[in-house]
Amino acid sequence: MKRAPLTIQGARKLRAELEQLKSVARPQVIAAIAEARAHGDLRENAEYHAAREQQGFIEGRISELENTLANAEIIDTSKLNPGSRIVFGAIVELQDIHSEDTMTYQIVGDLEADIKERKISVSSPVARALIGKSEGDTVHIETPGGRKSYEIVEVQYEA
């Protein structure tokens, strides 16, 4: 089985979520189930059923996070030393050649990709076009809106 790449920051975030689920959310839902049971007949107790559903979600997420962390390949990007070349974990500033708009993305694993946080998956078309390139290079990316050209303004790595 291929191990999914994960940055150290991504692993920390997943571990923090796992800890929060185990130490806060799980005990809260157990207490909610106990309180709902105290109300009597469980067949028509909406609070009980909602709490049990929430418990199922929490236990499923705990299992998913534990499995993800156990099977992930955690990569310390500070030890890669790629220079100005773009590799996994790079934070890349791009400038659109035509509009001169700039954008910054970090190339991360599929498990931690989140466009709202400007983190794109290493397997995405944009990241695949960037991998191996350096500052000053121009890349051409096929997008649903047509072919776009970007200049790589800066490449950096988190310490």
Image (tube, helix red, strand yellow):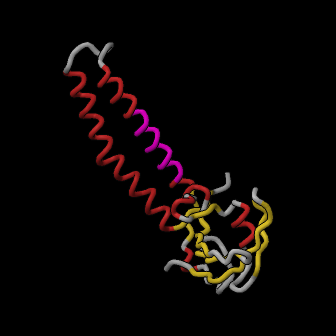
Q: Quadrant of residue 85?
A: bottom right
In the rendered picture of this protein, how many numbered marks are placed on residues?
Answer: 0
Q: Quadrant of residue 148?
A: bottom right
**Is 153 placed above or below 5 here?**
below
Q: Which residue: 79% across, 71% down? A: 140
Q: Where is residue 156 in the image (x, y as percent from the top left)?
A: 58, 81
Q: Which residue: 48% across, 67% down? A: 9
Q: Position of residue 153 (x, y in %)?
A: 65, 83
Q: Where is residue 94 in the image (x, y as percent from the top left)?
A: 65, 76
- Assess whether residue 30 is covered by the magenta stretch: no
Q: Which residue: 48% across, 49% down? A: 65
Q: Which residue: 76% across, 56% down? A: 144
Instruction: Judge left or right: residue 49 versus residue 69.
Output: left
Instruction: Judge left or right: residue 82 versus residue 16.
Output: right
Q: Compare residues 51 and 79 and report the one nearer the observer.
A: 51
Q: Where is residue 30 in the image (x, y as percent from the top left)?
A: 28, 34
> What is the magenta range?
55-68
Q: Compare residues 18 and 132 and report the one nearer the observer.
A: 132
**Is 35 placed above or below 141 here?**
above
Q: Quadrant of residue 35?
A: top left
Is the magenta region chiefly helix, strand or loop? Answer: helix
Instruction: Judge left or right: residue 111 versus residue 141.
Output: left
